[in-house]
Amino acid sequence: MKKTILTGIKPTGQIHLGNYIGAIKPALQLAKQKEFSPAYFVADYHGLTKFHQADEFRHLSYGIAATWLALGLVPEETIFYRQSDVPEVFELNWILACFASKGLMNRAHAYKAMVDNNEKMERNADFGVNMGIYTYPILMAADILMLKTEVVPVGKDQIQHVEIARDIAESFNHVYGDAFVLPEYLVQEEVAVLPGLDGRKMSKSYNNTIPLFEEPKKLQKLINKIQTDSLPPEAPKDPESSIIFTLYQQFASTVEVEQMRAQYLSGISWGEAKKELFIVMNRFLEEPRENYKELIASPERLNEILLEGAQKARTISAPFLKEIKEKIGFSV
Ligand code: ADP
Ligand code: TRP
């Protein structure tokens, strides 16, 4: 039996290189392994906790779907869907809410960070917190448990959420027997946290991103904006502390990386290093960028693919939800 491996991405901004390196690339690699059966989805209802502009939201949702496909996700070999097309997830969300203690939600990091920030700003502790943000981990638990997921590949920031999903599943199983599969997170330690233009973690919250499918001219301009020190062109430079080198490693071959390392040590100008970075990045992105443009121009096609994926998800979720409801004592 293959293990179900599941992950979701929220449509709250343009996909950037950090999302690709940290989430999409490793998930696509795992999808190719024989032991796993992948389920990847657009977490649109999670996005709604933060994003309330309808047209842009629609576009961003299709953008996430087109990105996965442009980078090589094979829909026939994946359960590839949009969260909001699987209504069983929301029924389960309520059921799980009745097994999730309020204290558990109080400790969830995204909510806690907002409260801490409000306190720092001397505002009401719950200022700006909607119930979607507060109960975010319950919906995430429903995503995971609904498809009997065993493995959840995520970034470090999401570990707590997977642990909460496990806690809620255990509370339910404690009462009704082994109903839910207990999920485990999979964090790939070797996956780099990609720095952004200013050296902090690349994140849409910091406005320091390189969007994945930027046009070549714009891509070059963004690369030119990467912050560097004021060492003269001929001075030897430390590759390990250079954002340009970190990015270069993600897209160049092993031989190219070693050549670049040698150039750093003997002295390369930042302008030259940026030019080389553009070349390897653009070489990799050219084809997916074209795929993406084609896909995003046909939302009907994307919709069709996502709805087919939702149908596949529902062959698991519908009978499983019925089982769960029977256990609870509903007549179904
Ligand atoms: P953002 O920080 O831009 O809001 P998200 O929190 O939506 O990004 O992240 C979506 C996925 O991309 C997560 O799995 C996260 O771990 C990964 N990710 C985001 N930024 C980076 C980065 N700079 N380096 C590596 N992975 C990242
Ligand atoms: N919370 C995740 C994020 O912010 C997105 C997400 C929603 C998710 N549901 C999920 C990830 C289920 C893994 C499994 O990145």
Image: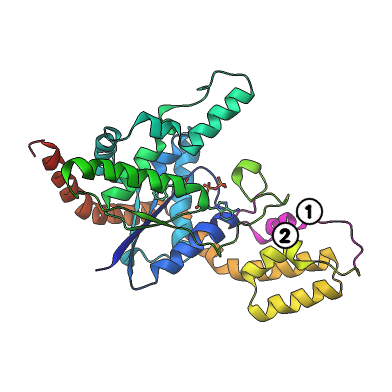
Under tag 2, what secondary structure? helix
Question: Magenta stretch: dominant SS?
Answer: loop
Identified by mark 1, the residue type is Gln
Q: Which residues are magenta?
A: 209-233
Under tag 1, what secondary structure? loop
Say which residue appears at 64% left-offset and 58% top-offset.
215
| CB contact under 8 Å: marks 2 and 1 | yes
Work out whether residue 51 can be spotted: no
The quarter of the image holding the C terminus is top left
The quarter of the image holding the N terminus is bottom left
Task: Classify residue 123 by image quadrant.
Answer: top right
In the image, farthest residue toward the bottom: 255
Residue at mark 1:
227
Q: Nearer the viewer, residue 309 or 167?
A: 167
Q: Crowdedness of circle 2 by 10 Å Cα count: few (<14), some, many (20+)?
A: many
Mark 2 / mark 1, whichever is N-terminal: 1
The image shows residue 226 at horizontal and vertical percentages of 75, 55
Residue at mark 2:
243
Magenta stretch contains residue 232: yes
Identified by mark 2, the residue type is Ile
Left or right for 171, reference 113: left
